[in-house]
Image (cartoon, grey):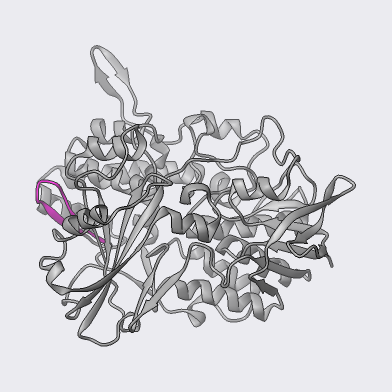
Amino acid sequence: MGRIAVIGAGMGAMAAAARLAVAGHRVVVYERGATYGGAVRRFERDGFAFDMGPALLPLPAVYRDLFIKTGKQPLEECVELVQVDPSSRHVFADGTEVSLPNASRAGVVGALDEALGAPAGARWGDFLVRAREAWDRTRRPLLEEPLWPNWSVLAEREPYPSVPHKKLLRTRRATTLAEVAAWELRDPRLTALLEGTALAYGLDPRVTPASAAVLPYMEHAFGSWYVRGGIRELARAVYERCLARKVEFRFETCVERIVEKDGRAAGVELTDGTVADADFVVAGVAPGALDRLAPGTAIRAEGEVPPRRGAPSRLTVLLALRGGRPEGVAHRTVVHAGDREEELDRLFGERSGLPAAPTVTVSRPDDPALVPDAEHEAVTLTVSVPSGLPVSESDVERVLGVTERAIPGLRDRLLWHEVRTPAYIAETTGADGGAVPAPALAAADGRLLHPSNGTRMPGLFAAGGWAHPGGGLPHAGMSGALVAGLIVEGPEFRGSQ
């Protein structure tokens, strides 16, 4: 079979590598860093360990499929998956709190009615029914199939069945997530619940299409899962599966350019001048990095989905706390912003810096592997911020102040903290400004689609969060499956059946 060069050892690239190796190809992965996993990284200090990328795994079926297709050991024999319950706890600006059960519509409806008052639960439950319809309409083209050549059909069609809304004698339907919240949910706390999902992916709810309803639905329908030992353990398992399939990894090895011969990708040139010939090249890198690897070459043809650029980034604060994790604490707590308009304006508008009280996601895993002993707790804080944002200590103090709404007495327990800024993400992933890709979404004139896995250069393919079907752990894993299918079966490949 063929020789394949994979650039980058992110989750999508490794998923492609494992599948291609099983198909009989000789696969070599070139990673400029010292380790695998891309954005799925770990920080360790003084017996504490922290995930610095995703904290939970939605839609684990993507990685179950990867392990079924690449070996005898299923995913659950390689990592321990735990379904977290409650799925999340929410602290709203008015002080109201609610904990939402995992993967239970009736339980979520009841919890919302009890915490927010009727008919909050019914409105959210009805929204989930409509979100399911959007999911059913978009699941295959946005997750399981290569991007359609006539992708504009996805760009024009709004799959979310919004409820008619009368305003000034006119009947309108919601076209954005913000309109869904205002016209169908009609409660500022339900608005925060819905828009918080978009913010976690760096999406502006005021312009994000209503089809983004599939994001909270996906979590609701398939549950929120934690990997014992941290999500980094999932990256380790995928890496070890690659090794078992004889994939070769070359760390701290930079690719200088993609070699082109007779109009097609023919290998990679390393920074020391070495050329590694290949029949196919798979690039698991951000758009700017791919441009630099093929200077003077039009990777995308006119009329294709262009690469997405300028997405927001993340600020991550790692907390080492004295005192054990209290019994019954939620794995994930979202403390919602005090001023929605200020947050959206600072994140997506012209004003710079963090808002006075940003939305903060607090991860508190119940996992002895992450702490030196039972008398300590490891906590990770995540905030969506503009890409390239310089972060000051006063910004971190603001984030800690918000977090005290979820962890009273936080500062008295704090031993030390570590900060990871957009600059860190830029350094480790190569994404300009530390931008983090969002999942692909239908409608909105294709603004939230990602470029196809195939490119204008024959033999060159793109995997990972910056290619179809976009960012997020399940989406990156699916991109690897699509790339492998296109290489093994050719352009007639139409996805899993």
Residue 322, image x, y percentages: 19, 79
Residue that appears at 27% across and 42% down: 126
**Does residue 88 appear anywhere in the picture?**
yes
Residue 153, image x, y percentages: 58, 31
The magenta region covers 88-99
Quadrant (top left/top right/bottom left/bottom right) for the C terminus = bottom right
Query: Is 148 rendered above or below residue 96?
Result: above
Residue that appears at 66% across and 34% down: 304
Quarter of the image for residue 298 reads top right
Q: Camera-side residue: 310 or 224?
A: 310
Residue 366, image x, y percentages: 27, 77
Q: Camera-side residue: 308 or 443?
A: 308
Queried whether the magenta region covers residue 95, the answer comes back as yes
Residue 275, image x, y percentages: 82, 63
Query: Is 91 rendered above or below residue 238?
Result: above
Residue that appears at 66% across and 81% down: 244
Quadrant (top left/top right/bottom left/bottom right) for the N terminus = bottom right
Residue 424 lies left or right of residue 370; in this view the side is: right
Quarter of the image for residue 371 reads bottom left
**Does residue 110 appear anywhere in the picture?**
no
Residue that appears at 53% across and 69% down: 64
Queried whether the magenta region covers residue 376, the answer comes back as no
Considering every residue shown, the one lying at the far bottom of the view is 373
